[in-house]
Amino acid sequence: MINRFNLYYSENQLFQHSDKILLAISGGIDSMVLWRLFEEAGLNYAVAHCNFHLRGDDSNQDEVFVKETANYLGVKIYTTHFDTQEYASAAGISIEMAARQLRYDWFEEIRREGNFRWIATAHHLDDMLETFFINLVRKTGIRGLTGIKPKSGYLVRPLLFTSRSEIEAYARSKEIEFRTDITNEDVVYQRNFIRHRIIPELEKLNPAFKNNLAETMENLRQAEEFNDYETARQIRKISSPQNPDEITISSLVKQAFPDQLLFAWMTRYGFNPSIIKEVYSHLEGEPGRQFFSKSHRLVTDRDKLIVTPIPESSEEIFYLENSDTWLGHPIQMTITRHAASEFRIISDPRTACLDEDKLEYPLILRKWSPGEYFQPLGMHGFKKISDFFIDQKLSIPEKENTWILYSGGKVVWIVSHRIDNRFKITKETKMVVQLTLDTQ
């Protein structure tokens, strides 16, 4: 098996021989076989063991066994304890899901602190087949039917080339000691039910069922790769060249499978299927609708769908003193001063030319607030900033990302758009303050 192991991790580029790897060890047969293979291969590793306290003293004996093995081999070991039942109850999730979240969060913490390149788990071929049925029952797409990936982020699974029966045979031949988890026989758990009840019945229909299913999953994986490639190509057609987080609705609806393209694009930002369906049903509806995932917001804006990170709720305020010559954050801006007699006005929305005597320092830079007014350059009356934004046809994200410069509580400049008429240069102006946005 060691030759197949070395070939598998090498051909699948799971890791380099010199990489520092954190090995997840429960003490069961699968992880102990993986441990032996790591030893035989001479890999650079340490082990990590979680005590979930789910099986009374058996859980403690698992920990003792793993620690003793590590000490015997002279291998560094990390251990931790979890009150898994309390966590599951507080989070309203199953014991299985709670244990999964707890262990992977902890593994990642150890990986970062210990500078490990990878986290290796002992998932094997049978685990992958069982995952196929679990996802099938839950409802899934092609990706969910391709099973467990050999590599996912920092996780590597170097035993996916072999089956449970081969692992058991190898353990017997090498006289590998391991701990037995009696809960693995309890068909109350979904995975165990599939393992002990479903798959054996299908093997009665065809003894080659496992191999056939593994080949089918590989076919699905290749189909997934092609689908991802073609979907990315189609999304580029309908995306803004300047902003991949923005697509054109009229271009989207002309595609052969607009709903599937929308699904692929929106899932990048964490939107769930029900929200994506709702967005699709409102493509030609009233603009300005907003939809949210945990991390992003989608806005319908005329012929566009625009995705932005959810804005922080805290208001940021920045100050400009009369001695400042440059602002580096939140926007980059150069400040220069000129004698009015020698100055020629620059007509560029990215530049504001102001009468310095009319300014009260410090100037304040912040985002706009609803209900605010200003006097647009060239007008004698006042206009709501919100109405000005509508006239400029700004999208909701553009409005939220617009900075306003204030002096003495009055709007001086809607940055990149329009200065306030009250601060314009006149014949009486002596000194000009020129604010110029730097090209980023």
Image (cartoon, helix red, strand yellow):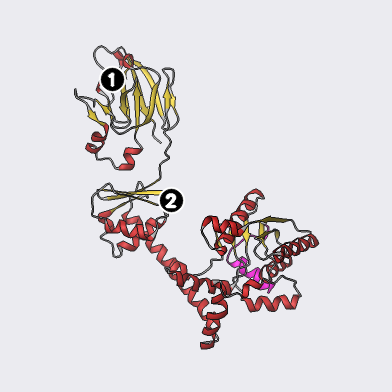
**Against 392, is 433 above or below?**
above
x%, y% of residue 414?
A: 31, 30
Q: Quadrant of residue 58?
A: bottom right
What's the CA distance linking mark 2 and mark 1? Answer: 42 Å
x%, y% of residue 8?
A: 61, 69
**Against 128, is 198 above or below?**
below
Q: Quadrant of residue 162?
A: bottom right
The answer to if 74 sits in the magenta stretch is no
Q: Badge 1: few (under 14), some or many (20 or more) residues near its Cα, within 10 Å?
A: many
Q: Residue at x 65, y 50 (%)?
A: 115
x%, y% of residue 112?
A: 62, 50
Q: Which residue is mark 2?
A: 294
The answer to if 3 sits in the magenta stretch is yes
Q: Is residue 209 left or right of residue 237?
A: right
Residue lying farthest to the left in this orientation: 380
Residue lying farthest to the bottom in this orientation: 205
Q: Which residues are magenta?
A: 1-18
Residue nearest the viewer, comparing 59 with 289: 59
Q: Is residue 359 left or right of residue 22?
A: left
What amino acid is found at the position of numbered circle 1 in the picture? Phe
For label 2, the SS is: loop
Residue nearest the viewer, comparing 53 with 242: 53
For label 1, the SS is: helix
Can residue 19 be seen in the rendering of this structure?
Answer: no
Q: Which residue is mark 1?
A: 423
